Every structure is written in structure tokens, then in C-alpha cells.
Image (spheres, rainbow, N blue to C red):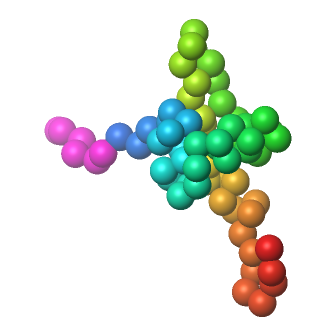
Amino acid sequence: MKDDKPIQPLAYSPEQAAKQLSVGRSMVFEMMKAGELTYSKFGQRTLVHADSIREALETRTVNKGQRG
């Protein structure tokens, strides 16, 4: 039986992560440096962990009525 579910990426390039977060590439690197996004290095290649992108969104969520 064939599984037709799309494969969810485990990691994104910094450019792809920026697109996922709707921020600039430099913001992704700032978040990586601050420890808000976890990443791995494979030679020259940097990959931002997909789960850390979701966690960053949850951490930075502003409740209704609050200002960020």
C-alpha cells in the first residue's frame, strides 16, 4: 500500500526558514545566534531545524490585548 502523505522537511536552509517565518534572512541568523533557532552544519551547509521554527513562533506569540 502506497503512502501518499507529503514528506514534511526536518530542516530548512536559512533562506527557506526566513520564508517560513515571513522575516528576512538576517533575522534568521540573529535568531540562530540568540539560540532561538536550532541548526545543524553539514560542511558549508546550514540547516535550521523545522521544530525550532514552530517553537519560535509559539515563544514569540503575543496574546490578544498585549503589545510585543
Residue 17 picture quarter: top right
Outermost residue, top direction? 43
Give the mark count: 0
The range drawn in magenta is: 1-6
Residue at left offset 58%, top offset 55%: 23
The C terminus: image quadrant: bottom right
Closer to the camera, 16 or 55?
16
Coordinates of residue 16 in the picture (x, y in percent): 47, 42
Instruction: Give the quadrant of residue 31.
Output: top right
**Residue at horizontal 22%, vertical 45%?**
4
Q: Is residue 58 visible in the rendered structure shown here? A: yes
Q: Quadrant of the N terminus?
A: top left
Q: Is residue 5 magenta?
A: yes
Q: Which of the 4 image quadrants contains residue 7? A: top left
Residue 20 percent across, percent down from the top left: 50, 52
Residue located 57% across and 9% down the image:
43
Q: Residue furthest left?
A: 1
In the figure, 11 relative to 56: above or below? above
Query: Which residue appears farthest toward the bottom when viewing the image?
Result: 65
Which x, y percent locates residue 22?
Answer: 53, 58
Q: Position of residue 39 (x, y in %)?
A: 66, 30
Task: In the rendered view, tell whether residue 62 sits above or below residue 45.
Answer: below
Query: Residue drawn 24% across and 42% down?
Result: 3
Prevailing SS of the magenta stretch:
loop
Is 15 positioned to the left or the right of 40 in the image?
left
Q: Is residue 11 visible?
A: no
**Residue 21 included in the magenta stretch of the image:** no
